């Protein structure tokens, strides 16, 4: 069988461009109906992505031929992915041959083994010859396998310590890793940080049996990474693990302690309750770099949800709204202990914020939402007097004259007269008598007064 070539639409431009070697080409093992002549043309276009799917069984000879042809033409293999595919020769034999074959290929950037049947400890050991010599791999994804903590420590951790180019590490649905495997991985990553600096930006361990102790080990690595040299973690995915409130608090403390600028934190179905939610509120008040916090299907109630809502939409006053977290997308779907009204408010608010392009637009939207729902006006005493005319103009434009009237009702007594110099000489009763004849308005406060011209 021959692979179907997914040629780019701009194939002619790739052929004529002087930098054709920088372009990327994909071979997808989906259909087997093309001849060798088109396969030879493919390897002349630049870096190659070899993607083998589950549509039909794969012969190891075909994989070896594609790798050999790429090496012969001097092309870099950008991505080598096995996505749920089955091998004619059986998984154990195929992986033993792959380990030997890939050992001679030192320029692979990404390796994905996702959902391949019967991948266990022996198959990971078979890949050790490749992992022991590779220093260019930037992304490694191993999902839906049956590795245990011992094999992880013997095979994967030495690779992590040796490879400083690794930016993405994804281990998904490997339930036997557990806390011991997470600790071994975190320790290996810390050693990289101490020696040469880590470039790891994405760490995903979804459904890997990680508990509180594993989360604490990962939090220790995050502290070490932030204080060391190199890059720092941007995405941490620990969903479908028994993290609990203690594990969540450990992660929050590590982020707060070292000022870690993590952007995405996924803890769906992680047995987190209100105590963990309260910890996240402390984090969100000070950390404005996190753009996604996913806590779906956890044990959070209205208490924890209200505290999280207050971090992104604090309606105590206008200033607290402005000081809220305006970049966070909070996801609490599936938390059945939260009342539908509160959950709907959080979901709707985050959806509206995602539509805004700038933080300033998010702030305006939240203030307008607050002004539309407030009944007793709003407190303006905390603002400087010089800002009061601009605030009132904004209120009238954003929410209308009715809301402006309620806002004025919540301020101190409104005085007015023709001559502002005579203001201090008149009594309160005299000022109120002159109110119908006003040509200007003055807001009197403890610190002074503001004069608003009628024009």
Image: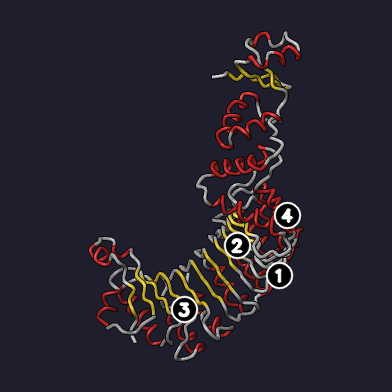
Q: Is residue 423 above or below residue 22?
A: above
Q: State the residue at coordinates (27%, 83%).
A: 35
Badge 3 crowding class, 10 Å Cα cut-off, few under 14, some 14 to 19, many 20 or more, is many
Query: Reading the chain from its start, which is encountered first: label 4 or label 3?
Result: 3
Q: State the residue at coordinates (69%, 56%).
A: 341
Residue topped by disc 4: 279
Label 1 element class? loop
Q: Is residue 413 above or below residue 400?
A: above
Q: CA distance from mark 2 to mark 1?
A: 15 Å
Q: Which mark is residue 195?
A: none
| Image position of 330 (left or right of 25) | right
Residue 50, percent from left and from top = 40, 75
Q: Quadrant of residue 175?
A: bottom right
Q: 35 or 162: nearer the eye?
A: 35
Q: CA distance from mark 1 to mark 4?
A: 17 Å
Q: State the residue at coordinates (71%, 65%).
A: 336
Residue topped by disc 3: 82
Residue topped by disc 2: 236
4 vs 3, front mark = 4
Badge 4 crowding class, 10 Å Cα cut-off, few under 14, some 14 to 19, many 20 or more, is many
Residues marked 3 and 1 touching at CB (< 8 Å): no
Q: Which mark is residue 242?
A: 1
Q: Is residue 227 above or below residue 38?
A: above
Q: Quadrant of residue 302?
A: bottom right
């Amino acid at each position: 069988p021959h692979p179907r070539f997914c040629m780019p639409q701009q194939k002619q431009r790739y052929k004529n461009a002087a930098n054709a070697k920088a372009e990327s080409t994909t071979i997808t093992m989906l259909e087997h109906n093309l001849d060798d002549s088109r396969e030879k043309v493919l390897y002349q276009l630049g870096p190659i992505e070899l993607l083998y799917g589950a549509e039909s069984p794969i012969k190891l000879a075909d994989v070896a031929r594609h790798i050999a042809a790429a090496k012969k033409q001097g092309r870099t293999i950008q991505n080598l992915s096995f996505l749920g595919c089955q091998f004619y020769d059986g998984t154990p034999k195929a992986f033993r041959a792959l380990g030997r074959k890939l050992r001679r290929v030192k320029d692979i950037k990404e390796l994905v083994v996702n959902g391949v049947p019967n991948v266990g400890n022996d198959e990971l050991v078979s890949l050790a010859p490749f992992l022991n010599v590779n220093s260019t791999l930037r992304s490694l994804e191993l999902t839906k396998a049956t590795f245990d903590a011992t094999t992880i420590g013997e095979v994967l951790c030495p690779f992590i310590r040796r490879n400083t180019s690794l930016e993405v590490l994804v281990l998904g649905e490997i339930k036997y890793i557990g806390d011991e495997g997470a600790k071994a991985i975190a320790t290996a990553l810390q050693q990289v940080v101490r020696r040469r600096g880590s470039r790891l930006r994405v760490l995903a361990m979804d459904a890997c049996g990680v508990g509180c102790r594993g989360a604490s080990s990962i939090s220790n690595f995050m502290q070490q990474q932030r204080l060391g040299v190199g890059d720092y973690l941007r995405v941490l995915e620990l969903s479908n693990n028994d993290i609990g409130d203690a594990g969540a608090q450990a992660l929050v403390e590590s982020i707060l302690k070292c000022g870690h600028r993590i952007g995405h934190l996924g803890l769906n179905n992680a047995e987190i309750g209100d105590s963990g939610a309260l910890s996240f509120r402390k984090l969100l008040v000070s950390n404005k770099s996190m753009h996604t916090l996913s806590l779906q299907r956890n044990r959070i109630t209205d208490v924890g949800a209200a505290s999280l809502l207050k971090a992104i939409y604090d309606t105590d006053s206008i200033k607290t709204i402005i000081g809220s977290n305006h970049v966070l997308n909070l996801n609490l779907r599936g938390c059945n202990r939260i009342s539908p009204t509160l959950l709907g408010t959080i979901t709707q608010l985050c959806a509206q914020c995602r539509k805004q392009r700038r933080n300033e637009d998010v702030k305006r939207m939240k203030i307008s939402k607050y002004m539309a729902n407030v009944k007793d006006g709003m407190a303006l005493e905390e603002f400087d007097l010089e800002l009061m005319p601009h605030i009132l103009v904004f209120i009238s434009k954003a929410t209308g004259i009715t809301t402006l009237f309620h806002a004025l009702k919540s301020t101190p007594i409104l005085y007015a007269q023709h001559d502002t110099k005579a203001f201090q000489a008149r009594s309160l009763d005299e000022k109120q008598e002159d109110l119908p004849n006003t040509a200007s308005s003055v807001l009197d406060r403890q610190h002074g007064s503001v004069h608003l011209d009628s024009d």
